[in-house]
């Protein structure tokens, strides 16, 4: 049964995946196990994306299916004491009001076991600084879609440096307009323009083998 | 005023036309940077640039004088894509062509939920931004297919624009919108005059859109549409087919203003696998392009993001159809695939202009042009023309000088 769930998520069979997951739980299945299977499926979708077999539409659809299943699975999981891979403070930078890239990344990061604190769009530098102080994340993820966001990223990194917080964190930037030269300019540790690569790099930044 | 303005404009136009006609120009043409840096260079806020046309024109003049290029494609208007309005008015060609750009004042008049403007929803220094949204339900495809113009004009726009919610509000809104269109057109006339004085070619730009993008950007929202493709594939396909005629109607209306180049910015191209692209996106986009070419237009398509997976489909278009403007697709590879068939445009990552040094830019342009210059058919341009406010001006100068040297 769980294998069917896995397969139908990876193959983008939305209805099939949701129905099988429901059936599994209704038959007394273990919600925690279901969650793990869904996570594996998201990992496989990410792998296919990085191989060039899947495209952004599959990442988005995969994320939707995952969210749909989680809606009725997560309430059945007790405790929540599960060990996370790490904590990410995530936001779209100042003067950029786009959320699509940030939201796709968030689903994949959570699916792979990160705790994500989403601080929203058009996020001032100070808000990133406050969030880092408050949540003590391992990673700060900054997203932008428009080119103006590129300079906001640099300013945010500078503010984190000023606040003496830079050394304690890894910074990854993401979004349609970022590349190696933007990473260098902003002073980030890694860059990705897709969620699959982004999550893989987050694991690498924390020294995990991927 | 540039003393040899007329001569300069002719030279620049010849350069561009040679590239578009797949010939080797005297020098590789450069489509320059624009965007937020244009007002910033004159100390203007983005808000002033979007709402004060007199100041905006002065800023444009100063920028174009100091940073000359062959085609200031990105440094002219400050409006956001209004293609859904083009379609809504497509039965009235004289009106329709005025709505390709929704300016800040037009946005205020409409009270739409598609855009965010500086000094309005966002800070005075922010770039104007397109957000889109979902203004059509999944079960309304049949209405869209049956009569797309009626459905968009009478059902979608009243949902998407606060000031079109009721017929009463709409009356006042349309009067206000008309006033803003007149002001915008007056500004465009002044812009054309300015371009001529500064020795830039006057090229009236037309426009069209990929039918699937119209649904994703303005009707259903990108995420919803991607789900719809899986859930209701036949309806989505039929909707793209139904949108071809209204899109053609507005695109061809640009003949009346002497436009010979139609611009189509793409959005969902990089989201789709080759299978989905060939089934839902490309057939109707191709039809739009081919029909425009048959009507005597050259078409310029902006392939947002990475178009690598779909590069070969471009070869299905008639040779010399127009310009393929790439953002992140490797232009060297693209030129290899498309040489002798399609003019290739792009090549400069904005990150390099924002964060690089003049020496790095010089080196980069030298290496790139060595590869793409031979044989012509190439226009050098930033992958995205919008340079942020803080872009170092010495880097823009370095780009221009490098093209002078190696072009």
Image (cartoon, grey):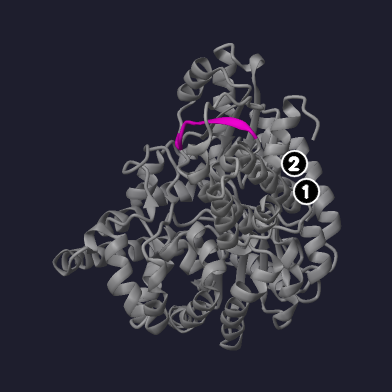
Report which residue position mark 2 lands on.
B361
Binning the other alpha carbons within 10 Å of mark 2 as few (below 14), some (14 to 19) or many (20 upward) gives many
Tell me which residue sits at (47%, 82%) in the image. Answer: B242
- Report the front residue among B39 and B104: B104
Q: Is residue B38 left or right of residue B401?
A: left
Question: In the figure, residue A28 lies in which quadrant?
Answer: top right
Question: Helix, strand or loop at disc 2?
Answer: helix
Question: In the figure, residue A124 lies in which quadrant?
Answer: top left
Residue B59 visible? The answer is yes
Q: Is residue B291 left or right of residue B149?
A: right
Q: Is residue A45 left or right of residue B156?
A: right
Q: Which residues are magenta?
A: A113-122
- Report the front residue among A162 and B243: B243
Q: Is residue A62 above or below residue B279?
A: above
Give coordinates of residue A149: x percent, y percent. 54, 38
Residue B387 visible? The answer is no
Quarter of the image that includes the C terminus of chain A: top right
Give coordinates of residue A82: x percent, y percent. 60, 26
Residue furthest to the left in view is B168
Q: Is residue A105 above or below residue B1?
A: above
Report which residue position mark 1 lands on.
B365
Binning the other alpha carbons within 10 Å of mark 1 as few (below 14), some (14 to 19) or many (20 upward) gives many
Q: Chain of mark 1?
A: B
Would you say residue A121 sits in the magenta stretch?
yes
- Report the front residue among A130 and B104: A130
Q: Is residue B221 above or below residue B19?
A: above
Q: Given contact means CB atoms under 8 Å apart, are the residues at marks 2 and 1 in contact?
A: yes
Question: Helix, strand or loop at disc 1?
Answer: helix
Give coordinates of residue B290: x percent, y percent. 62, 83
Tell me which residue sits at (63%, 35%) in the image. Answer: A173
């Amino acid at each position: 049964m769980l294998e069917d769930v896995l397969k139908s998520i990876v193959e983008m069979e939305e209805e099939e995946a949701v129905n099988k997951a429901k059936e599994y739980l209704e038959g007394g299945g273990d919600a925690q196990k279901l969650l793990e299977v869904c996570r594996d499926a998201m990992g496989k979708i990410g792998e296919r994306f990085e191989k060039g077999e899947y495209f952004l539409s599959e990442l988005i659809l995969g994320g939707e299916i995952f969210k749909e299943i989680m809606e009725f699975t997560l309430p059945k999981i007790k405790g929540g004491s599960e060990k996370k891979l790490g904590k990410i403070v995530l936001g779209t930078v100042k003067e950029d009001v786009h959320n699509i890239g940030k939201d796709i990344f968030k689903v994949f990061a959570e699916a792979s076991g990160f705790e994500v604190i989403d601080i929203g769009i058009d996020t001032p530098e100070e808000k990133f600084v406050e969030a880092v102080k408050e949540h003590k994340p391992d990673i700060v993820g900054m997203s932008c879609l428009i080119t103006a966001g590129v300079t906001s990223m640099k300013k945010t990194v500078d503010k984190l440096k000023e606040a003496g917080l830079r050394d304690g964190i890894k910074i990854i930037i993401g979004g349609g307009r970022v590349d190696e030269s933007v990473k260098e300019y902003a002073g980030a540790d890694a860059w990705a323009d897709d969620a699959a690569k982004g999550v893989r790099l987050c694991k690498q930044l924390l020294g995990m083998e991927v | 005023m540039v003393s040899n303005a007329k001569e300069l404009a002719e030279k620049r136009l010849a350069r561009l036309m040679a590239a578009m006609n797949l010939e080797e120009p005297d020098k590789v043409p450069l489509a320059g940077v624009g965007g937020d840096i244009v007002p910033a260079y004159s100390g203007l806020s983005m808000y002033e640039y979007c709402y004060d046309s007199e100041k905006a024109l002065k800023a444009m003049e100063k920028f174009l004088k100091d940073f000359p290029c062959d085609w200031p494609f990105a440094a002219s208007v400050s409006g956001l894509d209004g293609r859904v309005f083009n379609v809504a008015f497509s039965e009235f060609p004289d009106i329709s062509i005025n709505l390709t750009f929704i300016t800040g004042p037009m946005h205020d008049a409409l009270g739409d939920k598609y855009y965010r403007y500086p000094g309005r929803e966002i800070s005075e220094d922010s770039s104007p931004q397109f957000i889109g949204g979902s203004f059509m339900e999944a079960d309304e495809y049949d209405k869209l297919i049956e009569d797309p113009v009626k459905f968009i004009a009478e059902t979608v726009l009243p949902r998407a624009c606060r000031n079109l919610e009721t017929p009463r509000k709409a009356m006042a809104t349309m009067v206000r919108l008309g006033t803003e269109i007149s002001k915008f057109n007056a500004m465009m006339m002044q812009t054309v005059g300015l371009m001529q004085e500064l020795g830039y070619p006057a090229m009236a730009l037309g426009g069209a859109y990929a039918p699937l993008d119209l649904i994703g950007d303005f009707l259903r929202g990108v995420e919803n549409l991607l789900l719809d493709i899986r859930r209701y594939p036949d309806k989505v396909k039929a909707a793209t087919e139904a949108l071809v005629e209204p899109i053609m109607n507005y695109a061809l209306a640009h003949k009346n203003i002497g436009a010979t180049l139609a611009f189509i910015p793409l959005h969902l191209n990089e989201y789709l696998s080759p299978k989905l692209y060939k089934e839902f996106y490309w057939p109707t986009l191709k039809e739009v392009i081919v029909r425009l070419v048959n009507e005597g237009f050259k078409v310029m398509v902006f392939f947002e993001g990475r178009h690598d997976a779909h590069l070969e489909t471009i070869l299905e278009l008639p040779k010399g159809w127009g310009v393929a403007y790439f953002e992140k697709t490797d232009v060297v590879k693209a030129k290899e695939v498309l040489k002798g068939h399609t003019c290739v445009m792009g090549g400069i990552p904005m990150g390099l202009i924002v964060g690089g040094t003049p020496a790095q830019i010089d080196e980069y342009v030298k290496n790139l042009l060595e590869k793409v210059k031979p044989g012509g058919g190439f226009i050098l341009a930033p992958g995205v023309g919008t340079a942020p406010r803080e872009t170092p001006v010495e880097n823009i100068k370095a780009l221009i000088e490098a093209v002078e040297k190696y072009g």
